[in-house]
Amino acid sequence: MSSAGRDVGTGARWPQDSRARKRWDYALKEAQLYGNGGQHVGPVAGRIVAEVLIGLLQSDPNGFLANSPSWQPTLQNPGSGFRMTDFLTYAGVDPATRHSQQPSFA
């Protein structure tokens, strides 16, 4: 791929198709405006990411969601719903300080 297909600052690839490029630009701008200066995606990009992940999980014929479609999380306090902070806490990540460390990418 030519250097035109890479972000000069990060080396990240971006779409060549103009429609895909516009969506990518929108997602990046939204993250800048709504996502704590780019720390995380905004509401539209977050919805896209969530729907893609759910679709992948649902389409795996050997996956948990395909075999147990009525499963509901049971870690939350009764009546409070299951929030992302509940998941982070269960995973051992302190939601209050998760942005204080630099991410490590493998």
Image: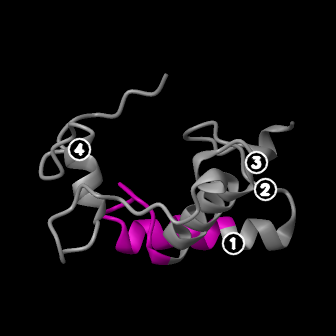
Q: Earlier in the sequence, mark 1 or mark 4?
A: 1
Residue 61 - label: 3
3D distance between C-alphas at marks 3 and 4: 27 Å
The relative height of residue 10 versus residue 76 in the rendered view (above or below) is above
Q: Which residues are magenta?
A: 24-43
What residue lies at 57% left-to-right and 62% top-to-bottom? 49
- Left or right: residue 92 versus residue 70 is left
Residue type at the position of mark 2:
Pro
Mark toward the viewer: 3 or 4: 3
Mark toward the viewer: 4 or 2: 4
Mark toward the viewer: 1 or 3: 3
The 10 Å Cα crowd at callout 2, few under 14, some 14 to 19, many 20 or more, is: some
Q: Regarding mark 4 in the picture, which secondary structure is present there?
A: helix
Say which residue label 2 marks: 15
Q: Regarding mark 3 in the picture, which secondary structure is present there?
A: loop
**Nearer to me, 34 or 79:** 79
In the figure, residue 24 lies in which quadrant? bottom right
- Left or right: residue 69 versus residue 73 is right
Mark toward the viewer: 3 or 2: 3
